[in-house]
Amino acid sequence: QVQLVESGGGLVQAGGSLRLSCAASGHTFGTYVMGWFRQAPGKERDLVAAINWSGSSTYYADSVKGRFTISRDNAKNTVYLQMNSLKPEDTAVYYCAADYSNVVKRIPSHYDYWGQGTQVTVSS
């Protein structure tokens, strides 16, 4: 079992920045692909960014490329999402997820564990 707890969400003006953190416990963190998903009201949950266990492979949705950066610190069992140049369309609940593999996958059902989510609201 892996427990995931997100933090760092909040309200920010367009153009601002936020850094999300996801602290993991309960299993060997370094063996999991970690992903950040987001879900806006009435929309599907989509993968924003993901990183493999070593950090050598990352994925970014086209909508966030160049603005968001995913990173992980396996010694601290934590994955981060640095979000810069935020836009109102980035407003959503952001979820951290863990997949027990070393291949980055985009489909939510492939992820084994989920956090409770953290709200990010970007005002125009």
Image (tube, rainbow, N blue to C red):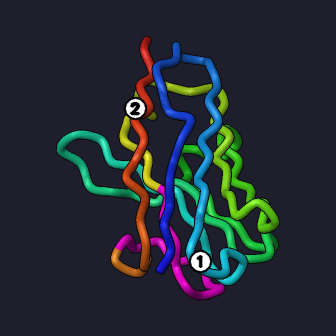
**Is residue 97 depicted above or below 110 in this figure?**
above
- Is 58 on the left or on the right of 101, as rendered? right
Dividing the picture into quadrants, the one containing residue 46 is bottom left
Q: Within 10 Å of the Cα at label 1, are there few (<14), some (14-19), or many (20+) other Cα atoms? A: many
Magenta stretch holds residue 107: yes
Q: Position of residue 43 (x, y in %)?
A: 24, 48
- Is 17 on the left or on the right of 71, as rendered? left
Q: Residue furthest front?
A: 26
Residue shown at the point (67%, 57%) measured from the top left: 79
Q: Quadrant of the C terminus?
A: top left
> Principal SS element in the magenta part?
loop
Q: Helix or strand or loop: what does disc 2 sit on?
A: loop
The residue closer to the viewer here, 87 or 52, is 52
Dividing the picture into quadrants, the one containing residue 101 is bottom right
Residue shown at the point (56%, 75%) measured from the top left: 26
What residue is pinned by disc 2?
Answer: 91
> Which numbered disc flags the more N-terminal residue, 2 or 1?
2
**Is residue 105 depicted above or below 40 in this figure?**
below
**Is residue 97 depicted above or below 91 in this figure?**
below
Q: Helix or strand or loop: what does disc 1 sit on?
A: loop
Q: Amino acid at mark 2?
A: Thr
What residue is pinned by disc 1?
Answer: 104
Residue shown at the point (50%, 53%) measured from the top left: 5
Q: Residue furthest bottom?
A: 101
Residue shown at the point (70%, 66%) measured from the top left: 58
Q: Position of residue 2 (x, y in %)?
A: 50, 74
Start and end of the magenta stretch? 96-108
Q: Within 10 Å of the Cα at label 2, are there few (<14), some (14-19), or many (20+) other Cα atoms? A: many
Magenta stretch holds residue 40: no
Q: Position of residue 54 (x, y in %)?
A: 80, 75
